[in-house]
Image: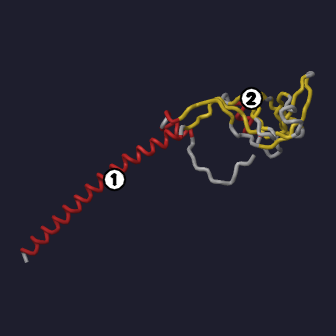
Amino acid sequence: MERGNNKVFGFVSQQVEKVIPEATTKTANFIPNIYEHCEFTNTTVNNIPHSTITLPDDYDIATLSIAMNSSNISTRVRVINEKNENAELDFLLTSNVSGYGLMTEDISDFTNNSSNVFVYGTEVEDLTTIDKSYLYTLNVCATQVLSRKIDTLEASNSAMVSRIEQLESELNTLQNSFK
């Protein structure tokens, strides 16, 4: 999985929500806040098989820890196997001398006994999404209103220019008559 190198232009949904709330919706969904290929190992805890997904050493665990302490994020994670299949799992954040991990149910069957999995990210309860078609429609309507205003202003400007030219002509006539 790659993010790509193309520039992405878009909207910040929270900013749109403040101005045009009817163009936004809140929903529970997964966000790409981990977005890493990770190794996992299988373990047994109290005779129950588990998998521990090891987060990369350079992953900033502080962002995940802060998000977990927020009331807006759950302890669920979306992982993707080599066949591009998704699994949504409950997890417990763990740590040891080698780093941080996510302890989940046993995922060895899901990963076809591979030792790698792509970790997309965690679930949030209040993901704000934007109805872009609503924004585009609103933009077209606003553009039409502005176009009519411009047409009116151009007509008014043209009338004023004509009036100014007429007054300048009359002024020149008056000035020439006093010479």
Task: Inspect the image, locate mark 2, and give the three-letter code of the amino acid beneath it.
Answer: Thr
Q: Amino acid at mark 1?
A: Ile
Q: Residue 75's mark?
A: 2
Mark 2 and mark 1: span between their CA atoms? 54 Å
Q: Counting other residues with Cα less than 10 Å from the Cα at mark 2, is it few (<14), some (14-19), or many (20 or more)? A: some
Colour scheme shown: secondary structure
The disc label shown at residue 150, or none: 1
- Seen at 86% across and 29% down, the residue is 106
Name the N-terminal-most of marks 2 and 1: 2
Q: What residue is rendered at 57% in x and 42% in y?
A: 12
Q: Position of residue 79 (x, y in %)?
A: 77, 36
Residue 84 image position (x, y, % from top left): 77, 39
Q: Are marks 2 and 1 in contact (CB under 8 Å)?
A: no
Quadrant of the rendered image containing residue 93: top right
- Is residue 179 shown left or right of residue 24? left
Rate crowding at label 1 as few (under 14), some (14 to 19) or many (20 or more) other CA atoms within 10 Å. Answer: few
Q: Mark 2 falls on what kind of element?
A: strand
In this rendering, the answer to whether 169 lies above or below 86 is below
